[in-house]
Amino acid sequence: MNLIVDVGNTRIKLAVFEQSELVYLMRTSKDEVVEALETLFKDFPKLEKSIVSSVGNFPEAALQVLQNKLEVLQLTKETLVPFTNKYTTPKTLGVDRIALVSAAAIQYPEKNVLVVDAGSCITYDFLTAHNAYVGGGISPGILMRYKALHTFTENLPLLSPTRPANTIGDTTENSMHSGVFLGVVNEINGFIDFYREKYPDFTIILTGGDAHLLRDSLKNSIFAIPNFLLEGLDHILEHNT
């Protein structure tokens, strides 16, 4: 039984996997993560090993609690992964993208795969049918675009991400929703069309916190998998043990 710790910029996900199946998932804050871990150890006494993936700061006290209980693998650029990394600057590749590509490599062997992660940023990662990661793209996420409109203008309000009711915005707020949402949808469709010129046949995975807002508006056939990153971290942990 594996414990997956995914440390984001603001929240931490704690996930329990048994034989590659997600059996428990919770989100906690950095202030409460030690207490959450201690509760998990009581609820899941068969936990054996753990992986920590961090794009934010993981409290030292929480890491110590983990190491006192379990074998802990901290995901770094040097960790063994189930794909060949062709990225020109591999040491700059984020651990979140490493996890996503690992999930693609294990779950879709011998296939071309494009993983679109719609989170704080929108990332595009492409894995070839020869199991080679060739790179992708990074652009601002939905919430980041709303914040940019508010921050860099005098009069535009700060709105919460909302799917627009109409394509043509008839108020300033509706125009902002239309501009952000349709801009993202067209961007993703454009990326897909670009990759299709070089790779006519590939699988598209949509994941991340905003995937639920986007999946029904994309013109392409996709697989929406909410916990794809967590699954990738579990695969990496198994690959290293």
Image: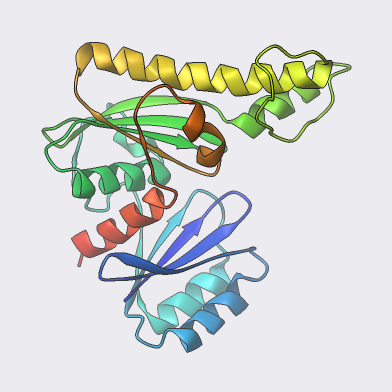
Q: Residue at x 88, y 17 (%)?
A: 155
Please say whether residue 119 is visible from this viewpoint: no
Please say whether residue 229 is visible from this viewpoint: yes
25 vs 21, left or right, is right
Q: Residue furthest front?
A: 166
Q: Position of residue 122 (x, y in %)?
A: 49, 31
Query: Which quadrant holds residue 16?
Result: bottom left
107 vs 30, left or right, is left
Relative vertical location of residue 108 with respect to residue 230 in this rendering, above or below: above
Relative vertical location of residue 69 with respect to residue 177 in this rendering, above or below: below
Q: How many marks?
A: 0
Q: Position of residue 165 (x, y in %)?
A: 69, 25
149 vs 216, left or right, is right
Q: In the rendered view of the protein, which quadrant contains the C terminus? A: bottom left
Query: Which quadrant holds residue 94?
Result: top left
Q: In the rendered view of the protein, which quadrant contains the N terminus? A: bottom left
Q: Residue at x 26, y 16 (%)?
A: 196
Q: Residue furthest right?
A: 155
219 vs 180, left or right, is left
Q: Residue at x 65, y 63 (%)?
A: 29
The front one of 208 and 72 is 208
Colour mode of the rendering: rainbow
Q: Position of residue 26 (x, y in %)?
A: 54, 66
Q: Position of residue 210 (x, y in %)?
A: 55, 39
Q: Residue at x 79, y 24 (%)?
A: 150
Query: Which quadrant holds residue 49?
Result: bottom left
